[in-house]
Amino acid sequence: MLKGFLKDILIYLPSRLLPALTAFITIPIVTRLFAPAEYGYMALAVGLSDFLVALASSGFGSAVIRFLPAYSARSALGAFFLVLGVLVAAALAGVGSISAGALLLLRERIPAALFSLFVISLLIFLVQTPFNVFMAVARAQERSRLYTIFQLLFRYGSLGLGLLLVLVFGFGIEGMLWGTFLALAFTLPFLARSTTKGLRFSSKDVRPADATQIWRYAWPLALGNMAMWGLRLSDRYIIGLYRPASEVGLYSAAYGISERSVDIIVGLFLLSVSPLVMNTWESRGGEATEEVLTMVSRVYLIFCLPIAVGVTVMALPFVELLTAPAYHEGYRIVGYVAFGSFAWGLSHIAHMGLAIKKRPRRLGANQIIAALANLGLNVALVPRFGYVVAGVTTLAGYVILVALQAYGSRAHVSWRFPFKTLRNVLIAALCMGFAAWGIYALIDRGGGQNVVGLAMSVAIAAPIYLGCLWVLGEAREKEKAALAHLWHTAIRTPDVPDNGRS
């Protein structure tokens, strides 16, 4: 089981690592081309499209992960896709028309430059919604290679087209958004064909009960994911409401660096976890599912927690390296955002009991409660203390979410959290963090943007972390064997034939 899970992660790795690298390409360029206020406007526009996508499609994406295996088992995928298509189209029409009307009503109150970006965001929503649903289908089908291909086409297509429009054709900051729209529009038809190829569609197979079942599962999750948008992105709007637009830019640039650094690994795990857990539940039952949750939790802690620690320790060098000087002070929020991303990933493991037992209302309610807590803290604290406190409240909101999801799931599936692993990983990560900080301090002479010092710190600190885990006895024999097998496979050397997943 561990070997198969790690293999899926390695297959998904390019779909997370390479797209995440686009942020480390885009941010240095954009922060040097545009002032913090302009960057802040782009962040607000991206936040709007993310909100609309979360409202219209995220619930259906979760429904795909939950129901597609069951429909596949009874050879009814054609009916499933027809029902799903009708529901997504209805959501697009409803959310899109309401959003367009709201923009027109508020046009006089929105700065002209920001309004034009909001219009592009609405167009992005119209194509990204079905794109995300079909990507969820690829995940549910456990077609990790297909998912990776289209994720890379979208991310690098967006980056390439956006920079082309800005640098060659003289577009302003809106060129980056147009690049996203064009990349989605070009790839969507091919993704839809790839995920539905070979299926037969007949309206005779459609049952009203199917639509009702999917809708009842999806809409509470959509509301909950809309609340998650509030937890992840509403802080920018609150900062923009009470503070100068430049603070939105400072916050967004540093947030993007921190979030992408941790999400490379966190998002990678989440891509594999849900299909693995759901398929284990359907095929092997509750006891095997609980074992999978414990295994996933251990691997998550081992890989993700040290990333959050490392990004926090090296926050200032990272921000100095990747942004223009006007953005450097944003490094103060990096640690809070990094641990917030870590907690966000942990909440996805914690909620599996609710997802398995089809408790979408409880899932959505927990997300709404956490988002409201975050929103209240932001409204109370940001006007007085500025954008830095928004990073603190983000972390607080995710911690609340983990607690709520774990509490709600415990009646359905037992989550045997590996506290011993947590202790060992914390000790090893702290040793790694002190080593990285010390090495960089010895090499750096206060000039900033020390690429060599940063690279050497990471290169030396990583083996220290692994060595500490080894000394603490965290690595198990089966895990050592699984990792060795994957290593031999990766470098294409002969290995003992694998007759089944361990």
Image (cartoon, grey):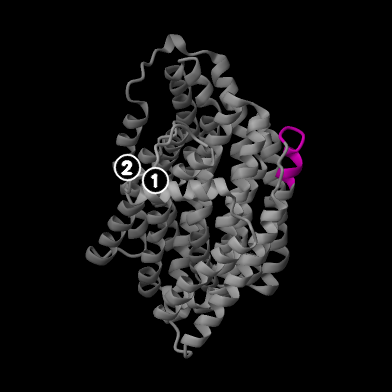
Q: Is residue 405 magenta?
A: yes
**Disc 1: CA contacts within 10 A as few (<14), some (14-19) or many (>=20):** some
SS assignment at label 2: helix
Q: Is residue 131 above or below residue 77?
A: below
Callout in the foreground (1, 2) = 2
Q: Position of residue 204 (x, y in %)?
A: 44, 9
The one nearer the camera, 491 or 72, is 491
- Is 97 placed left or right of 200 in the picture? right
Q: Which residues are magenta?
A: 404-413
Q: Is residue 241 at least partly visible in the picture?
A: no
- Tell me the quarter of the picture where residue 55 sits: top right
* Residue for badge 1: 123
Distance from disc 1 to disc 2, alpha carbons, whole Å, reads 10 Å
* Residue for badge 2: 185
Q: Residue at the far front: name it.
A: 496
Please name the amino acid that badge 2 sits on: Ala
Q: How many marks?
A: 2
Q: Is residue 19 above or below residue 141?
A: below
Q: Position of residue 427 (x, y in %)?
A: 66, 66
Q: Residue at the far left: name it.
A: 168
Q: Is residue 311 above or below residue 44?
A: below
Q: Is residue 312 at least partly visible in the picture?
A: yes
The residue that appears at 66% across and 41% down in the rendered structure is 351
Q: Position of residue 10 (x, y in %)?
A: 43, 47
SS assignment at label 1: helix
Q: What main secondary structure does the magenta stretch of the protein show?
A: helix
Please name the amino acid that badge 1 sits on: Leu
The residue that appears at 42% across and 82% down in the rendered structure is 450
Figure quadrant of the N terminus: top right
